[in-house]
Image: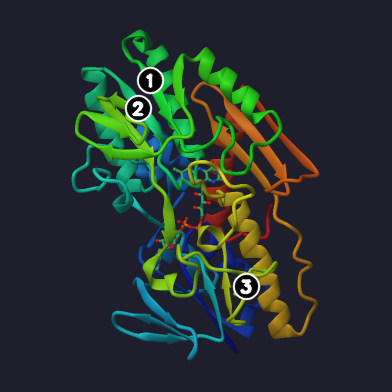
Amino acid sequence: MAKIVIIGGSFGGLTAAFELKRHLGKKADVTVVCDTDRFIFIPSLPWVSMGWRKAKDITLSLREILLLKDINLITEAAAGVDADSSKVVTKTQEIPYDYLVVATGPHLCFEEVPGFSREKGFIECIFTLEQAERAHQAWNRFLEDPGNVVVGSVQGVSCFGPPYEYAFEIDAELRRRKIRHKVPISFVTSEPYIGHFGVGGLGKSKRIMEDEFAERDIKVFVNQAVEEFTPEDVRLKDGTKLPFKLGMFAPAMKGVPAVAHLGNPRGFIPVDKNYRHTRYKNIFAVGVAVAIAPPEPTPVPTGVPKTGYMTVKMAKTSSVSIVSDITGGVPPEGIPIDVLCLMDMGNTAAYMKAKPVLPPRQESELKSGIVYKWMKIGFEKYFLWKMRRGLSGLP
Ligand SMILES: Cc1cc2nc3c(=O)[nH]c(=O)nc-3n(C[C@H](O)[C@H](O)[C@H](O)COP(=O)(O)OP(=O)(O)OC[C@H]3O[C@@H](n4cnc5c(N)ncnc54)[C@H](O)[C@@H]3O)c2cc1C
């Protein structure tokens, strides 16, 4: 029986675990090693920060859902991987594997910008459940005494969607409360233009997003790096100071320390077209943990986003590859990855498609409309329903 260990229990890890068990059944002993017992539907975190969702609405118990499919769970952080002897190391044990899937997501690099640290807490972030809940408290305080809002992405960011969503949601909610005229909103980004998204734009993204920011009266600062966050303002490297009462920024990302030694200088793991490590043939990596080179250099560094949709696709491809190794079947073709994404815009939403993710592309488009908002809400419910039952084989 092949021993397969997966580090991480989110989009990548959970999908890989279900897919491997689905294909291999009793031929594999599948174990998930995760530092938490919870699956959180991360795309809904901006809604938590707005008070539109509670933690319980978007959380599943990993233990319960993995148990259903006869998958083991070790609720402990991986401290390291000994790739030469094929072992995952935690504080209390060594876990041997025949195949390893790394799905550890990001280390959020608050330490790279002075004043961004969680301890000081001048600036909110919405990338984890705890951060989104804290941001919701800050939002409630802000509503009692509104003022300037600054939203943005620091240098090196790859996950650009959440600040866009947050800026649009705040704008929509302030209008709904009829107090938008009391709140100047600034949007700061390391992207060379609005709608670049770290992928060189897609379809009419530049035109549509620029119009959207103009119509909503949100002041935009592109090509920006943040020098420092202080309790009163955001200081940009070009000398601009943007005062704020409420600030929310996306951080840059690295690979998590436990697996960084398997990766490039930022700790992201180099893989082939089937998500197999380029050096260690029994190690696979999926999702945010994977190294993807940017499509073009940008004046201020930016990275390529690895979305939930891309992560699930990577997990499925890597699983088929492991299954073919074990059963002697045909390995997957390794088709370049594409992306579908729904971005909330408060009172509406945008649908984005890029095939493949990076240019040149066969297809690329961005459209907005209320129907995409309904689709986004529907997708959240559908994905949680699917994962609760371990039905990873569904689209
Ligand atoms: C606010 C926000 C909104 C987003 N919205 C969208 C969206 O609308 N659509 C979309 O497609 N994508 C969206 N994304 C991106 C999407 O969330 C990611 O693509 C997805 O979460 C990546 O999955 P992953 O499994 O690679 O990593 P993660 O989801 O980050 O999961 C990593 C897992 O590894 C575990 N872990 C980490 N370190 C260790 C360790 N040392 N030992 C054991 N376990 C460990 C973590 O606990 C977690 O379970 C959004 C991201 C954010 C932050």
Q: In which quarter of the image is residue 87?
A: bottom left
Mark in the foreground, 2 or 3 = 2
Q: Earlier in the sequence, mark 2 or mark 3?
A: 3
- Asked if one can make out residue 60 in the rendered structure from this viewpoint, the answer is no
User: Mark 3 = which residue?
Assistant: 20
Q: Which amino acid does label 3 sit on?
A: Leu
**Whole-percent x and y of residue 381?**
54, 42
The quadrant the N terminus occupies is bottom right
Asked if residue 312 is positioned above or below residue 192 in the image, the reply reads below
Q: Nearer the viewer, residue 59 or 96?
A: 96
Name the residue located 44 percent from the left edge and 19 percent from the top edge: 219
Q: Which of marks 2 and 1 is nearer the N terminus?
A: 2
User: Mark 1 = which residue?
Assistant: 185
Q: SS at mark 1? A: strand
Whether pointer 2 and pointer 1 mark residues with C-beta atoms closer than 8 Å, the reply is yes
Q: Which of 305 and 27 is in front in this view?
A: 305
Q: How far apart are marks 1 and 3 (CA)?
A: 46 Å
Name the residue located 47 percent from the left edge and 25 percent from the top edge: 168
- Report if the beta carbon of the residue with label 2 is closer than 8 angstroms to ligand 1: no
Q: Which amino acid does label 2 sit on?
A: Val
Q: Which of the numbered marks, if any, corresponds to residue 150?
A: 2
Q: Which of 25 and 90 is in front in this view?
A: 90
**Whole-percent x and y of residue 350?**
61, 30
Q: SS at mark 3? A: helix
In this rendering, position of residue 180 left or right of residue 321: left
